[in-house]
Image: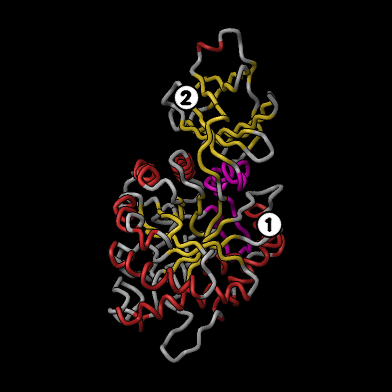
Amino acid sequence: MSLTGFQTTADDPLMHRCEPGEAPDGHEEHPGIRLNPAVRYQRYLGTGGAFTEAAAINYSRLDEAEKARFLEGYFSPDDGHGYSLCRLPMNSCDFSLGNWACQPSPDAPFSLARYREHLFPMLREAEATLGRPIDLLVSPWSPPAWMKTSGEMNHGGRLRQECRAQWAQSFVQFVQALREEGFSVWGVTVQNEPEAAQAWDSCLYSATEERDFIRQHLGPALAEAGLGEVRIVCWDHNRDNLYERAQTILGDPESARFVWGAGYHWYMEECFDNVQAVHDAFPDKGLLFTEGCQEGGPHSGEWAVAERYARSMIHDLRRWCQGWIDWNLALDTSGGPNHVDNLCSAPALVDPRQGRFEWQPSFHALGHVARFVPPGSVRILSAAATDRLDHVAFAREDGTCVLVVLNASEAAVDWSLRLGEAAHAVTTPPHALQTWVLSGR
């Protein structure tokens, strides 16, 4: 068995090669992580981030050499993360320069003009680097103000009952318009964070309102337009109430027949077991992580952010999550722009005055999954004789196996990686993330 390792640590957050030791005769003295490729779980759809207006504007401010480095890091399938499953807001979000909509008034034509300014150029260059279309997940933060009970896009409010059919047609128009531009729409979420009345673009849906909108309007509208293959993802909010929302929507046969599965975020409590609960209750439905970032500013250089990413990815994937989408691909060094100053972190922080950017530790943490677990990989059994390591394993389509390991403790952990009769001694430093690629038997 050939074993190749890659490591990122709090002391050195770049990704470097690392070497295992030879398994001594007494390797059983160390706790082991045993892989069993015969036991298989979910197929992985891919990793990605969000093409927000803020990300696109920051990207546009880079000089040409930095743009190339940015694209290579995120989208190259050979030397980068190979991002292939990404999120795109429908209308404005908080990481926009202000409120705007594709149809700002009832008599206005539907238009993607705003996307053509910064978003589409960035998206096309990303796809050129990837070498194929990116699968897009479309998410609205708010319908246009005129469709809402509150008369504004911010501060929650609800979709007016008499506008539900028209809003469903807006989804159809948006998907069709993206396809006319040459983009690939993998799916749509019904509403970003439907339980949160935020200071920014937001719209409230109760569980029954989301269920009824899907089964009476959105599902039929997509099907009648010949877009039945566009996946509908419900919830798109935090793990805490993930099961509650899924029970209402996926537990209803009329809405469930239109719904691919549930999406979720990581804010509030971690509640990883709720991801497993949805799979256990609805094993024929999918699960997708659709947003996560560190709130409260840019957090430049902070290892704790990287560790949060690693922990979330590992625990989500161990609970049947099929894809993992980060939030903004890039923000500036203040954590924006954001039209209500909801400043946050991103794996790439841009200095617009210098036309340069810096990768953050979170970028390298994301790479431990994104670079080594391509779409089509299947999660396999990994069982550990220690609680000091978080871990998840995959079998790739090329026949190799991948094990991702996180040590979030203050002390190094000596352990043994075992596959069949083969074993290797491994040391994972404190606050370190490792990926081990195993080939041959």
User: How many other residues sit within 10 Å of disc 2, few (<14), some (14-19) or many (≥20)?
Assistant: some
Find disc 1 in the rendering and name its residue.
130
Residue 427 among magenta residues? no
Task: Please say whether residue 422 is visible from this viewpoint.
Answer: yes
The residue at the point 55 percent across, 59 percent down is 86
Rendered position, 38 above or below 85: above
Quarter of the figure with residue 142 = bottom left
Residue 225 location, x and y as percent?
A: 52, 75
* Magenta residues, start to end: 347-376
Considering depth in this image, is 333 or 229 the residue closer to the camera?
229
* Secondary-structure class at tag 1: helix
Image location of residue 29, percent across then percent down: 50, 11
Query: Which residue type carries mark 2?
Result: Ala
What label sits on residue 384 in the rendered view?
Answer: 2
Residue found at the far top of this picture: 25
Image spot of residue 228 (x, y percent): 51, 67
Q: Amino acid at mark 1?
A: Leu
Q: Is residue 332 visible?
A: no
Farthest front residue? 253
The first of marks 1 and 2 along the sequence is: 1
Q: Nearer the viewer, residue 138 or 125?
A: 138
Q: Residues within 10 Å of mark 1 (few under 14, many from 20)?
A: many
Tell me the quarter of the image containing the N terminus.
Answer: top right
Viewed as shown, does residue 129 lie left or right of 419? right
